[in-house]
Amino acid sequence: MSLHLKIALISLISILLPLSSAVFLIQNPILSLILGITVSLLSILILLRIVKPLDTLLKGSQILSDGNLNYRVDIRSGDEFEKVGTSFNSMADILKKAIERLEQDKGGIQTERNTLSIVLSSVVDGIVALDTSKKVVLVNKAAEGLTGFTLSEIQGKPINQFIHFFSETEEISPKGYCATTFTQPLTLVGKDGKQNKINLLASPVPFDMQANLSCILILHDLSSEQELERMKLDFVSMASHELKTPLTNIIGYLSVFIDENKDKLNKDQFELLDHSLVSAKQLLALIENLLNVNKIERDQLSVIIEPTDIGNILTKSVEDLQNQAKQKNITLTLTSISGLPKVLADPIRIGEVVTNLVSNAINYTNPGGQVAVSSQRMGNELITTVADSGIGIPEEAIPNLFSKFFRVSNNLQKASKGTGLGLYISKSIIQKLNGRIWVESELGKGSKFHFSLPIAPQTNLGSIDSDKFVGQAIQKGALNY
Ligand SMILES: Nc1ncnc2c1ncn2[C@@H]1O[C@H](COP(=O)(O)OP(=O)(O)OP(=O)(O)O)[C@@H](O)[C@H]1O
Ligand SMILES: [Mg+2]
């Protein structure tokens, strides 16, 4: 029986019952009583049939909302309540499946989160994620170690309240973190002023409404690398110094011996000793180069800048190398040095540069070639040029030419011995003296190495004798070559 029919029946009974009771009460009170009781029982029964499924539905929804998603209602009233019961059960089925799917997704998200957290904490570099207002979103274990702050201490707070990055000259503002490429190491200042040298790699995060991330900072700790580098420099410095003294003695003894016994030695003996002397000198030059590189790397290359007569230095270097050039049948000339203004430079260091360039020119020029040294004023600078008619330098090698240990790798070049340090040292010296060094070259035709130095201003200093300056500097122990 449908629900409407049941309600209609109850309504009908509630109208008919008082009417019929009134009619029968007058004629037959007993019949009226029996009829009254029967009709009342009938309406109670019908009412119960309405209330029971309602009650079942109510209980069912209560149990479901308490979390028992397996509970289903059992209504077989054959009316709309049975249909509501069926819909209730299928709704419970859908709810159960949806919740199961959510649980699965939650498990997946948790696994992903765990994996990400393991990856982040295993990365040896520090990682700091910042939101669009430069507040800390996340730091990994390595970043906690470097900064001294734990994630809970700084999460959600502006990074610059806790962590600061300094270049050599200034503090980097948080706005600049992701807008700049940092080529030089920075100093990170963290908790209680804790400092670390780091390389900072900052990458902007593409805009995403949900993520609200703006920038990821990668902090590469340089302290262990610096320690290793320092140990390497210490070792090279110590080994070079230890080798230098006995080698200088060997060269001294050999020179004296050869000089004193020139007449007594036969040709073979003389050549043997002479080769030993040349090799010992080459070894000493290498050790001196290593010591110089060591000083450059430690930023301890000392220069004493003073008004310097470059003409004297060029003359001396060319004289010293004349023999080497003659042995190779190379014409070595020095031109246009008269009337040159003084430059602001370190005479001894400039002598080293000129010697490096001229001996390169001799080394990398075939017999019969020419090497010419000259100097000329250009504005506020004096440009010195060492030109040769040698083998030249391939275009692709030129950008690396002034790098440490770089040598051109063609056969002609390989034939000549060298360590690839001369030009690196020369460039470092010239830069220290506020000058520039560069090269023009054509393969097979020759090369021109130029370096510039600032001209000394025409003040009282201009008349000061450079030899006197060097003498004073050596006396004071300032020149520690
Ligand atoms: N004048 C030149 N002509 C041709 N190649 C040159 C010339 N000068 C330098 N080079 C090339 O540049 C390289 C680097 O020169 P650099 O003086 O630094 O080292 P090196 O001469 O090899 O060794 P060393 O440290 O003993 O000077 C050389 O190996 C050579 O290949
Ligand atoms: Mg050289």
Image (cartoon, rainbow, N blue to C red):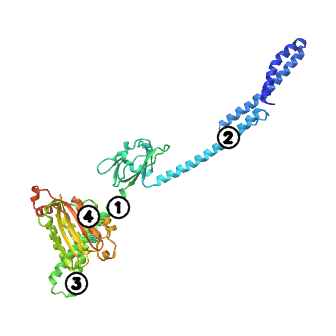
Estimate how packed mark 4 is, as few (under 14), some (14 to 19) or many (20 or more) residues with alpha carbons within 10 Å: some
Q: Name the residue under label 3.
A: 271
Q: Name the residue under label 2.
A: 69
Q: Name the residue under label 1.
A: 228
Circles 4 and 3 in contact, beta carbons < 8 Å? no
Identify the residue at horizontal 25%, vertical 75% (top origin): 365
Query: Which kind of residue does numbered mark 1 sit on?
Result: Leu
Q: Mark 4 points at which residue?
A: 438
Estimate how packed mark 1 is, as few (under 14), some (14 to 19) or many (20 or more) residues with alpha carbons within 10 Å: few
Query: Which kind of residue does numbered mark 4 sit on?
Result: Trp
In depth, the one of 199 and 80 nearer the eye is: 80
Comparing labels 1 and 4, the label whose residue is closer to the camera: 4
Residue 103 place in picture, x, y as percent: 61, 45
Quick check: 249 above or below 88?
Answer: below
Task: Return the disc, 2 or 4, that comes first in the chain's sequence.
Answer: 2
Comparing labels 1 and 2, the label whose residue is closer to the camera: 2
Query: Mark 1: which secondary structure?
Result: helix
Identify the residue at horizontal 35%, vertical 61% (top origin): 228
Task: Return the disc, 3 or 1, that comes first in the chain's sequence.
Answer: 1
Estimate how packed mark 2 is, as few (under 14), some (14 to 19) or many (20 or more) residues with alpha carbons within 10 Å: some
Query: Which kind of residue does numbered mark 2 sit on?
Result: Leu
Identify the residue at horizontal 15%, vertical 65% (top origin): 310
Residue 285 place in picture, x, y as percent: 24, 71
Task: Return the disc, 4 or 3, that comes first in the chain's sequence.
Answer: 3
As measured in the structure, the alpha-carbon distance from the residue carrying label 3 to the one carrying label 2 is: 104 Å
216 to the left or right of 79:
left
Residue 51 place in picture, x, y as percent: 75, 28
Q: Can residue 478 be seen in this view?
A: no
Query: Mark 2: which secondary structure?
Result: loop
Comparing labels 4 and 3, the label whose residue is closer to the camera: 4
Quadrant for ligand 2 reads bottom left
Task: Return the disc, 1 or 4, that comes first in the chain's sequence.
Answer: 1
